[in-house]
Amino acid sequence: MSRESEFRPRYGVIGAGSVGRSLIGRLPAKARELGPIAAVSYRVASRIANVLRAGYAVRTAGELERAPVILFYSPPDQAEALLTLLEAAQMRWKGRALIFCDCEAEASARACFHQRGASIAVVRQFGIAGRIAVEGAGVALKAARRIARALQLKPVELSAGSTDLFDSAVTLGTCALTPLIDRAAAILRRAGVRDRDAVYLAAALFQQTAREYAHSGRQSWGWHSQEPEVKRLEAQIRASELQLGPLLRELLLLGFEAFDRHGEVASRLRQRERD
């Protein structure tokens, strides 16, 4: 009896690049779960199987039909070639799940397989320990939830088509925020705070704000009830660096608008900006 016929695999894999470092490589009990593994060549598929220490290489993407759930992973520069290979595969897609793991899934590619009857999901890490972002529907969503449980990760489920919106929030809270922390540290240095202390204090201020927001939401905002003093705000804006002053003003106005508080203060800030 061949290795392939000894069990019915739960997952098939089509991949490129560092598959072992993706969520696929982190799946427990891989030897009992993974079956056929396809890639741009049999040699690459064999290498992936060796890295995963599970599954077996196949020569054509069509052989993935042996598994009800297909896991896809590829770095951006190889995704198109791998998708073309999968699209050309002679296999029945109806009732099958295709899950993109830790990689981008273009809307056109997802639509292509959905039209053929496949159920689509995306599962990926997004920088928060213990959680995983999940988007999908049907049997693919159920399989994605099963993967999250196997990895002991809490799924953060997104509504259909909202990946870019979710990513914008992640970017706002990460890469877009880092320069703001850096500018706060720079201002502290200008105020005479030693370099190491300035970095620590800037980070601590943002961390404290984030903790308070996690605990109390909008009510954690320092001016939720108490109205700020316009003269003090204007003094702070003037004291800031030339490039940061306008940004600080806009952030203050954003807070007044987002939390629907202190409209008179906001109006006076806008008026003084025009003066």
Image (cartoon, rainbow, N blue to C red):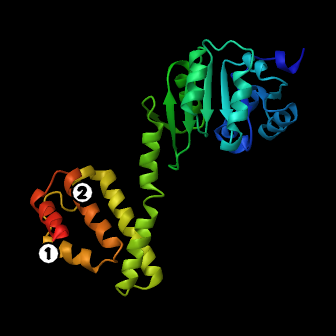
- Where does residue 117 sit, x and y in percent of width and height? 59, 14
Q: Is residue 250 left or right of residue 115?
A: left
Q: Nearer the viewer, residue 233 or 85?
A: 85
Which quarter of the figure has residue 191?
bottom left
According to the image, label 1 marks what residue?
A: 231
Mark sitting earlier along the chain (2/1)? 1
Residue depicted at 52% across the width and 45% down the height? 130
Horizontal and vertical percent position of residue 180: 40, 66
Residue occupying the far right of the picture = 1
Residue at 25 percent of width and 66 percent of height: 249
Q: Is residue 82 above or below residue 68?
A: below
Quadrant of the snapshot with the N terminus: top right
Residue bearing the label numbered 2: 255
Whole-percent x and y of residue 181? Answer: 41, 68
Is 224 situated above or below 274?
Answer: above
How far is disc 2 from disc 1 in space, using C-alphas?
17 Å
Q: Quadrant of residue 176?
A: bottom left
Looking at this view, name the residue that lies furthest to the left.
264
**Which element carries disc 1, helix, strand or loop?**
helix
Q: Residue at x 55, y 19 (%)?
A: 139
Q: Which kind of residue does numbered mark 2 sit on?
A: Gly
